[in-house]
Amino acid sequence: MTVSGTVEHVYEYTSGLVADINVDSQFKNDSAISAIRPFLVRITVPTISHLPKPGETVFFTGVFNTVKARQGIPDEIDFTQSLLIKGISSTAFVKENDFHITGRNQSLFWKIRYLKDRVNYFIYTSGVDAATSDFLSATLTGDSSALGHESRTLFSAAGLAHILALSGAHVMILAAVLAIGLFPLTLFQFNRLRIICTIIALWTFAVMTGLSPSVTRAVIMTTTVSCAYLLGRRNVSMNALMAAAMLIILFDPQSLFLPGFQLSFAAVAAIILLHQRINPFNHHRLFIRTAASIFLLPCVAMLATAPISIYYFHYFPLAFLIVSVPATYLLTIVIGGGVVLVILTALSVPHSFLCSVMDQMYDLANKMMEWAVSISGSVIDNIYIDGVTTMLLLLIPVSIAALVHYRNLSWAVATVLIAMASTASFVLSRPVYSDHELFITTESDVTNFLIKEHSNLFFITNAPETRVGYMIENYSFRYKDYMGRRKIDSLTHISGLTESENIYFDGRRLWWRGALFAIIDSDSDLRPMIPRPDYAVVCRGFRLDICDVDSIINPTEILLSNDLNLTRHDSYVSELEEKGIRYTSLRKTGLFHLTDK
């Protein structure tokens, strides 16, 4: 099918590119173009000479596959779920010659989005160091592609990963810079014009960075409060927060299930309810109260977001308690300076001193994070909680807010009871796992065996040796929750002759705890076996008569692997059913699983 649309996102890899495209028209056989109902498709292009950019219009030809949630091993990270949440309904593989860039979308929305490239240009030509430029690009435009893996890991371990993701804090910084820059309008009694200019600038920023839930929430809240001021109405922060949530869910219901949406609203709600209420100093001691408020702000946000963060990401950074206040505010100043830097660069105003100061501040923040992370036990990882425990933990800051507001014994008791219930839920919800499991996974291009033996995880594959390194890296990420929950230390590839207490593998036969598998991925594998196999796993590469597998190898059951060509698979199914031979199609049943409890 040949279609055209607008590029939404581009992800560049060494082997090619992945792009999300909003398809809105289709080419018919007579080359006529007809409009269709828009849908998002993620395409993979193995090699390409010219990298497309968001906002460019393209047309391409490919075979479209509907995105469906697949059955993986327990606790496996399912990438298809993330695609569905983002609204991506199809995927396609596209050859380079079938992919063409036709122009740029010139709607107002995309003209604003194009400002992102211009801002990045000003950042990288401003004169700051490369590390500072990469940080500013991530925090001012949302483009974190230049940030290395080490930088991301450092921010995560220090509990400051949220700074790299655009959020309400970045909107507040931009609003503060705008307030200073537009202050002359206030002096000349044009306060309403200043507010209107600020709202327009913030919405431009939100559109330029892709309308992420956290940024959109902050801009809607700012707009609501500003409109209340312009109309002479009283504003309530919590009402503005709820209005923002309702509007975002109305236009994008899927955002409710995104971690970013949940973390953003939980943090702001906690700040509104608790930040000033738990400050122990009264307004008569303004300096001390302000200092305490600066310290309490990130702590309150962490208290509210910790249960959600642990539920999704399974770790808690204790280093946050050490570096949160100084590093957060240092980086906040750097971001604010970045806004000024972009403006000065665009106006060709000399700013070498500002560049030097920003580089030193960013370097100091990095050194603080590195020091905190180097402390033993700075991160507690592999924390797994279920939904009930998460909800109970989220009730704790709510009960604390009620306790601070009403100041009576009943809410103190309620807080203690909720904390006890959370602990009990965490203990009781911990499942008991088998020490021994075997899976044949659901990949469509290879046949993989995964074997769990106590705290070790092994995998056997019929993929070429050149792919094994990539597969280990990929599976270490995909199966990290499976491994983390079961205290598995490592993922090990088995190849060639392997003998252990419960595993024997010689390239053709796999024996595991009394079950014998014959792996048939070429015609030469069709030879008699002694003893008789329990399972004959027929994989891609076998092309002979499927009934010969039953007559020559004589397994108890034939397993048709997921990586078989679909036409060949269907032909084998017909022959086996006609002959009454016992078989299982893994393409139809999904995951194959054996356990020894």
Image (spheres, rainbow, N blue to C red):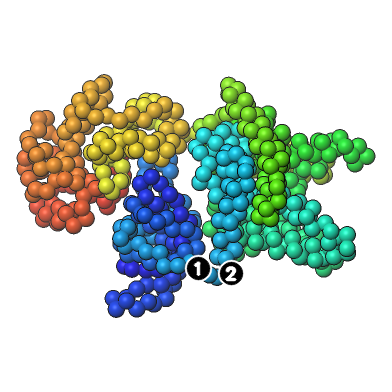
How far apart marks 1 and 2 lie (CA) works out to 9 Å
SS class, disc 2:
helix
> Residue 363: x and y, percent?
64, 33
Which residue carries the number 2 mark? 108
SS class, disc 1:
loop
| The label number, if any, that marks residue 105 in the structure image | 1
Compared with residue 421, is residue 236 higher up or lower down, i.e. above or below? Answer: below
> Residue 449: x and y, percent?
28, 37
Return the residue nearer the eye: 475 or 154: 154
Return the residue nearer the eye: 489 or 47: 47
Q: For residue 507, which quarter of the picture?
A: top left
The reply to whether residue 595 is in sight is no
> Residue 509: x and y, percent?
17, 32
| The label number, if any, that marks residue 225 in the structure image | none
Q: Quadrant where the N terminus lies?
A: bottom left
Residue type indicated by callout 1: Asn
Q: Quadrant where the C terminus lies?
A: top left
Compared with residue 70, is residue 160 higher up or lower down, i.e. above or below? Answer: above
Q: For residue 243, which quarter of the picture?
A: bottom right
- Residue shown at 41% from the left, 67% from the top: 102
Compared with residue 368, is residue 443 higher up or lower down, i.e. above or below? Answer: below
Q: Is residue 359 left or right of residue 470?
A: right
Return the residue nearer the eye: 317 or 410: 317
